[in-house]
Amino acid sequence: MIRTHIFDNPFPLLIQELFKKEYNYEGSLDNLHSLFETTLITPLDIDYHRHIHPWSNDRDSIFVKKFHSYVDNCPDFNETYYAFIQKHIKPLFPDETKLVVQKTPNIRFSFPDSAAIGCDPNDPENIIGLHCDSNFGHNENEMNFIVPVTRMYASNSIYYEPTIDSKKDPFEYENVVLNTYQFFEGYFNKLKHCNRINQTNKTRISFDIRVIPYNIYMDNLEFFQGTKFEIGKYYIVL
């Protein structure tokens, strides 16, 4: 299932506030890479963002770390995030009274000449991080929601196969195209998806959110017990 939904996006303002606080940055978020031309970012962190890294350390970005510190210390973000789930995600599950939701969304930064995720040794040439979420232990009942903080298009975005196990060449995959007033719903647990090198000259920032209906989670409780995907760890109930 692939759907796009319209909403009033509160997240760009919050992320703008984060970078103003941390770096006194007031420019456009899709030009965030301009910080690399300043002395505000260490040479080591600049160098990190000029390379594609393996899965194992693709979240060592200083920006990802700043985001998680922000979430841990800013009630406004979590209140906004939970309100978004209640207002926009819950209605997409009309038969459910509760949802199991990713506690903190993954934030993605796709800078020019780089990519938002790590690579896999088996990636085809010029394809970055080809996978489906079940490869990483995610339950097959998860749905994925992608929320843009900046516009997503062309090579700064995510590419995905049209149907499960389509056998299509990844270069024939469709890409997620979103303005900041839209969010995306897709079944990336089984649909293969990937990045490419961002050649748009614009930074893409977005959130990945995973959701499971509460009753289905409880019916599959044995799958989650003893893993990082337990409620209270990776997930919360809303």
Image (cartoon, rainbow, N blue to C red):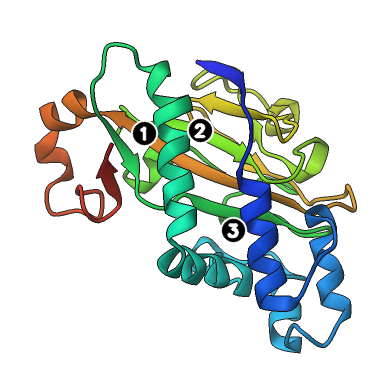
Does any portion of residue 150 appear in the rendered image?
yes
Residue 223: x and y, percent? 16, 39
Residue at 78% over, 70% down = 25
Choose between 131 and 69: the one closer to the eye: 69
Choose between 40 and 197: the one closer to the eye: 40
Residue 101: x and y, percent? 33, 39
Which quadrant of the structure image shows residue 169? top right
Vertical comparison of 97 with 83: above or below: above
- According to the picture, the residue beneath numbered tag 1 turns out to be 211
Which amino acid, mark 1?
Val
Near mark 1 (Cα within 10 A), the count class, few <14, some 14-19 or many ≥20, is many
Residue at 70% over, 59% down = 16
Q: Are marks 3 and 1 in contact (CB under 8 Å)?
A: no
Q: Are marks 2 and 3 in contact (CB under 8 Å)?
A: no
Could you say whether the residue bearing mark 3 is in a helix, strand or loop?
loop
- According to the picture, the residue beneath numbered tag 2 turns out to be 145
Which amino acid, mark 3?
Gly
Could you say whether the residue bearing mark 2 is in a helix, strand or loop?
strand
Near mark 3 (Cα within 10 A), the count class, few <14, some 14-19 or many ≥20, is many
Query: Which of disc 1 and disc 2 is earlier in sequence?
Result: 2
As drawn, the label of residue 118 is 3
Residue 214: x and y, percent? 21, 29
Residue at 58% over, 23% down = 167
